[in-house]
Structure formats: structure tokens, C-alpha cells
Image: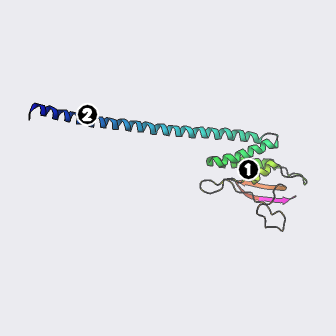
Amino acid sequence: MDWARRIELFTVVVAAVVAVVGLWYSNVQTRQANKQAQQATAQARDDRALAKEGQITDRYTAAVGNLGEDKVDVRLGGIYALQRIMQDSHRDQPTIANVLTTYIRTHTAKSPAKSQDVPADVHAALTSSPPATQTGAAAFSWISAAPSSPTSTSHPHPDSRRLRLVNVWVVQLCVVQTCVART
């Protein structure tokens, strides 16, 4: 083989080696960029989850604060806010159910006079429909009420605005005894 042919062959081999090294280097750089992008995505997901938890905590604190207000409409807003948080955060359902049952217990300690309705905020807390948890079990059980008249059993959800609750026992967020009488 003459020198010109050898130089040409050497140039082709060097070009091929450079191309292979370039492809390998490009592959390494692409893998590193993908790894960094995955890490950034995971970090962003964690940041969003943390921000969501912080927002739920702020909403929960404000809603529970509203339960202690003097105005009924503000307390109603707190109850409805807690119900919304129960829908948004399955993790907080047992805590919120405990808050609502405690609220009902403390605000029904005295029965309303015979001519008075159950307060609107207590009625809202009683008739709230808690969402099912991921396992399908309810966060807390419905408080069952007597039929709207002693002989009527046709209506599954009686009008509970005029109910007097006596001896409501709450054990692990489940109502185990409820005595309800129409006034």
C-alpha cells in the first residue's frame, strides 16, 4: 500500500473513532441531563405536596377558629370549610370528624326550648355527609334519627332541624347511642 492510501485509511479510522467518542460523550451528557431533569421534577412534586399540606393546615386552622366565633354564619362557614377539607384531604378526615363531633356534643349540651329549632350550625354539622375514605369506610358514621313521626318510616332522612338530642355517646368517631325525640 502506498503512503497516500495509508494516510487516507488512517484519516477514515481517526474520523470513525472521533465519531464514536462523540456519540458516547453525547450519550453520557444526555443521561446526566435526564437524571437532573428527573431530580428537578421530583423536587417540584415534593414542593407542591408540601405547599398543599401547608395550605390545608392554614385552612384547617382558620375553619376551627371560625367554630369559636359568636356569629352563626361564621360558625357555619367553619363547618362547611371543614367539610371541604375532608374532601380534599383523606388524611385529615378522622381529625376533622373528631372536631365536628366534639362541636356537636358541646353545642347540644342544652336542649333547645320546645318552640326553638336546632341551631343552624349544629344542624349543618349533623347532616353533613362525610366523604368516604380511600378504603371505602366512612370517616364517621351518619347520626341516625328517628322517623319524622312515630308511625312513619318512609322517609330515610327526617327533618332534623327540630330534633332534641339526648345522651349522644361518641366512641372512636362512631355514634353508638342516639336518643332522638321530636319536639
Q: Secondary structure at mark 2?
A: helix
Q: Pinpoint residue 89: horizontal percent, then vertical percent.
A: 63, 46
Please check the rendered image and state whether residue 29 is part of the magenta-colored stretch, yes or no.
Answer: no
Range of residues picked out in magenta: 178-182
Three-letter code for the amino acid on which mark 2 is drawn: Val
Residue drawn at the location 68% of the way across and 40% of the way down = 59
Residue 30 left/right relative to 9? right
Location of residue 158 with respect to 110 vertically, above or below: below
Q: Secondary structure at mark 1?
A: helix
Residue 1 left/right relative to 82? left
Classify 10 Å Cα crowding around label 2: few (below 14), some (14-19), many (20 and above).
few
Question: Which of 35 and 95 lies nearest the eye of the viewer?
Answer: 35
Three-letter code for the amino acid on which mark 1 is drawn: Thr
N-term mark: 1 or 2: 2
Residue 16 left/right relative to 177? left
Location of residue 55 by image quarter? top right
Residue extending farthest to the left is: 1
Which residue is under mark 2?
A: 18
Determine which of the numbered discs, if any, sits on residue 101 in the image.
Answer: 1
